Image (cartoon, rainbow, N blue to C red):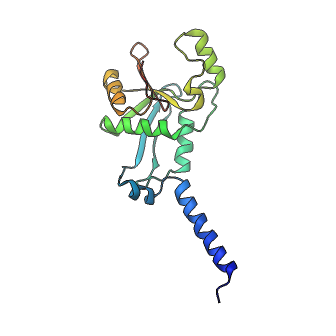
């Protein structure tokens, strides 16, 4: 005999499983709903300030993120002055991956700046008028980058075509800025 308590427990277990699927990392079910498929999320980074290199697959083809790989990305993109890390916004990581794929994929991306501690950002502001007081770098939402052997203008044009966030062009500084804020350019 099935009791009301048994039905209630089964319903709660099913609801929890569905919620975990829908609200956790993007699931295979979500991929089927929107009809899209995506390649694995792979990045190869060279942090020019720390001289460290990282090649990592941070997301599988089902859209599920690897927590250890995300942790490694957060470390690679840390503030090189204070060694502080933050949880980088996954939207800027995905923007970087889309940018790399649009440029042929598998590029070693040179990181000039990822996360910046507030102290380091203040120091940069005292040295240059071009550093924002409330920089998205301090929120883990911005990356300054270059790719050896690839023109900055090509990187900039490709980032603009993706229109996935902010794009700043700094040819004198030798980098392109991308962020996961609203689409804007400078």
Residue 148 to residue 67: above or below: above
Left or right: residue 176 versus residue 71 is: left
Please identify the residue farthest to the right as the structure is shown.
Answer: 5
Relative image position of residue 23 (x, y in whole percent): 55, 54
Q: Nearer the viewer, residue 161 or 111?
A: 161
Residue at image location 51% in from the left, 41% down from the top? 90
Location of residue 178 by image quarter:
top left
Residue 78 in view, yes or no: no
Residue at image location 61% in from the left, 10% down from the top? 126
Residue at image location 36% in from the left, 33% down from the top? 162
Location of residue 71 by image quarter:
top right
Residue 26 to residue 161: above or below: below
Please identify the residue farthest to the bottom as the structure is shown.
Answer: 1
> Which quadrant, please, contains the C terminus?
top left
Q: Nearer the viewer, residue 51 or 159?
A: 159
> Which quadrant, please, contains the N terminus?
bottom right
Relative image position of residue 82 (x, y in whole percent): 64, 26
Relative image position of residue 89 (x, y in whole percent): 54, 38
Relative image position of residue 31 (x, y in whole percent): 41, 55
């Amino acid at each position: 005999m099935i009791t009301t308590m048994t039905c209630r427990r089964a319903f709660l277990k099913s609801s929890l499983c569905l919620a975990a699927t829908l609200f956790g990392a993007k699931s295979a079910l979500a991929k089927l709903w929107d009809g899209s498929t995506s390649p694995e999320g792979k990045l190869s980074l060279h942090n020019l300030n720390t001289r460290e290199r990282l090649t990592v697959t941070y997301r599988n083809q089902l859209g599920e993120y690897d927590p250890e790989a995300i942790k490694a990305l957060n470390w690679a993109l840390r503030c090189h002055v204070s060694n502080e890390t933050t949880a980088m916004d996954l939207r800027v990581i995905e923007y970087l991956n889309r940018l790399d794929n649009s440029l042929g994929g598998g590029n070693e991306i040179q990181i000039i700046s990822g996360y910046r501690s507030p102290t380091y950002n203040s120091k940069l502001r005292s040295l240059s008028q071009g550093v924002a007081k409330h920089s998205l770098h301090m929120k883990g939402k911005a990356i300054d980058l270059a790719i050896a052997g690839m023109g900055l203008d090509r990187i900039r044009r490709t980032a603009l075509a993706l229109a996935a966030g902010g794009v700043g062009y700094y040819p004198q500084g030798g980098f392109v800025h991308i962020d996961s804020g609203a689409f804007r350019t400078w």
